[in-house]
Image (cartoon, helix red, strand yellow):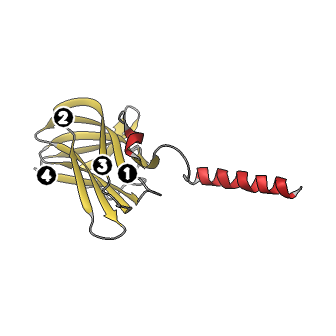
Amino acid sequence: MNSMTVRRCCLAAAVLLGLLAGCGGKGPQTLATLTFDDAAGLLELDPDAVLENGADGGVLLVDTARERIQVNLCELEGPRGDVEAIALGARVRSELIRRNLYLDLWIFPREGEPRLARTALREIRRTVPWTDVAVLVPLKAGERPAKLRVAVYADGAGRFWLDDLIVRAGRSADFDGGR
């Protein structure tokens, strides 16, 4: 092998490793996918939250008489590189929700205090069949999350199901058009 062939092989290997590591790739980074088929990746669930079988595998059911409930779902490392926003997408169904349902994103920066971005799921009211929801949380200028925590919050009694939660990070333009 001559030195030019060796350099090309090394360059090709470096490009491939960079793409596999998410460096230089286009589009958003997928940080987490929770299908709720099992407890893998979930934080300890509230007693009012249980995994149950759904039409396409597992779902998370939250059935509560409490006026307020927060169910912490997962904690994950912050995104790599410079990103502008964190996107949360999920499928949600509700029954007799008295007030509002929210997706929460706790952002733990590398320096400074954590902040909560709580977004109401306006399309989820009272009783709603399975509905796709999407939340986009813009990051503040210079904000570099070291860790993220995703939770669901209800400020009233009722029952709701959650499935196929996806957490992604990227440029705001990566998320134009929804999930």
Nearer the observer, disc 3 or disc 2? 3
Report which residue position mark 1 lands on. Answer: 84
- The crowding category of the residue bearing disc 4, from other C-alpha atoms within 10 Å (few below 14, some 14 to 19, many at least 20), is few
Give the CA separation, mark 3 to mark 1. 9 Å
The image's mark for residue 68 is 4
Image position, residue 104 (x, y; %): 25, 51
Give the CA separation, mark 1 to mark 2. 35 Å
Give the CA separation, mark 4 to mark 3. 23 Å
First-in-chain label (3 vs 1): 1
- The crowding category of the residue bearing disc 3, from other C-alpha atoms within 10 Å (few below 14, some 14 to 19, many at least 20), is some
Nearer the observer, disc 1 or disc 2? 1
First-in-chain label (1 vs 2): 1
Residue 158 visible at all = yes
- Direction from residue 63 to residue 79 in the image, left or right: right
The image's mark for residue 95 is 2
Nearer the observer, disc 3 or disc 1? 1
